[in-house]
């Protein structure tokens, strides 16, 4: 299994950097772990990019997991999931 350590800032200003780090791994066939233990700041745009990356890898038949999610990352993911389940536009709320 390959691993990428996510940067500490997943704010909207850092989305291009995150995309540049993830893009080379989109077609990797080996399972991929995204280590989230260093994440200190999260914006909806960062979560949406992570979701799209995991979704696109899954569509190619490749496994991706987030491991060691920091409390900040875990809380942001829970809030986004809750907003989606309630039909709230989380990006507008961030």
Image (cartoon, grey):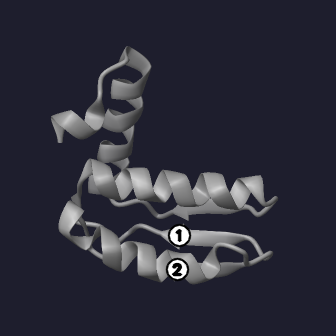
Q: Secondary structure at mark 1?
A: strand
**Horizontal and vertical percent for residue 49?**
43, 58
Q: Which mark is residue 75?
A: none
**Dot 2, how many residues are within 10 Å of its Cα: few (below 14), some (14-19), or many (20+)?**
some
Q: Which residue is mark 2?
A: 4
In the image, taking residue 34 as reference, residue 94 lies left or right, namely left
In the image, taking residue 19 as reference, residue 45 lies left or right, namely left
Q: Are marks 2 and 1 in contact (CB under 8 Å)?
A: yes
Spatial separation of the CA atoms under disc 2 and disc 1: 5 Å
**Horizontal and vertical percent for residue 15?**
31, 68
> Which quarter of the image is occupied by the N terminus?
bottom right
Q: Between disc 2 and disc 1, whose residue precedes?
A: 2
Closer to the camera in the image, 30 or 17: 17
Can residue 81 be seen in the rendering of this structure?
Answer: yes
Query: For residue 46, which quarter of the picture?
Result: bottom left
Closer to the camera in the image, 14 or 7: 14
Query: For residue 90, which quarter of the picture?
Result: top left
> Which quarter of the image is occupied by the C terminus?
top left
Query: For residue 81, which quarter of the picture?
Result: top left
Closer to the camera in the image, 8 or 93: 93
**Horizontal and vertical percent for residue 76?**
30, 45
Q: Residue drawn at (35%, 36%), measured in percent from left and top?
A: 80
Can residue 71 be seen in the rendering of this structure?
Answer: no
Q: Which residue is mark 1?
A: 34
């Amino acid at each position: 299994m390959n691993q990428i350590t996510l940067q500490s800032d997943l704010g909207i200003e850092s989305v291009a950097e995150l995309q540049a780090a993830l893009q080379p791994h989109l077609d990797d066939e080996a399972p991929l772990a995204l280590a989230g233990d260093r994440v200190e700041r999260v914006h909806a745009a960062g979560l949406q990019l992570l979701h799209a990356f995991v979704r696109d890898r899954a569509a190619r038949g490749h496994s991706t997991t987030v491991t060691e999610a920091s409390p900040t990352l875990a809380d942001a993911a829970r809030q986004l999931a809750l907003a989606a389940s309630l039909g709230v536009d989380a990006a507008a709320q961030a």
